[in-house]
């Protein structure tokens, strides 16, 4: 997602949320919403989005790693 990579975290979150409104079970959109939320300081929202993404794709190592780092406080900006 270009907005996330450009540091436009609020725009990235809005884009992910629009995608989720159309397809609530889109794991990649949930992941981007989680990462964007984390960048915006919304740790609880980030965790919820990431947990939903992992529920849909439990084998996804990147999703699991980011959530573990978020919970452990080692995810850095």
Image (tube, rainbow, N blue to C red):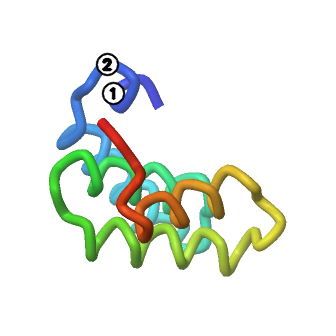
Q: Position of residue 24 (x, y in %)?
A: 52, 73
- On-image quarter of the C terminus: top left
Q: Residue furthest right?
A: 59
Label 2 neighbour load within 10 Å: few <14, some 14-19, many 20+: few
Residues tagged 2 and 1 counted as in contact (Cβ below 8 A): yes
Disc 2 target residue: 6
Decide if residue 64 is on the left or right side of residue 19: right
Decide if residue 2 is on the left or right side of residue 54: left
* Point 53% across, 77% down: residue: 51
- Label 1: state its secondary structure: helix
Compared to residue 77, the image places residue 20 above or below, namely: below
- Label 2: state its secondary structure: loop
Query: Count the marks: how many?
Result: 2
Front in this rendered view, residue 75 or 18: 75
Compared to residue 8, the image places residue 41 above or below, namely: below
Front in this rendered view, residue 67 or 54: 67
Q: Where is residue 4 in the image (x, y as percent from the top left)?
A: 36, 32
> What is the C-alpha distance between the residues marked 2 and 1?
5 Å
Q: Where is residue 67 in the image (x, y as percent from the top left)?
A: 52, 64
Disc 1 target residue: 3
Q: Position of residue 65 (x, y in %)?
A: 62, 56
């Amino acid at each position: 997602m270009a907005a996330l990579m450009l540091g436009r975290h609020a725009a990235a979150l809005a884009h992910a949320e629009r995608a989720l409104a159309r397809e609530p079970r889109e794991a990649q959109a949930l992941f981007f919403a989680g990462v964007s939320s984390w960048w915006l300081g919304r740790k609880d929202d980030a965790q919820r989005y990431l947990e939903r993404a992992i529920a849909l794709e439990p084998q996804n190592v990147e999703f699991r790693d980011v959530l573990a780092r978020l919970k452990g406080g080692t995810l850095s900006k």
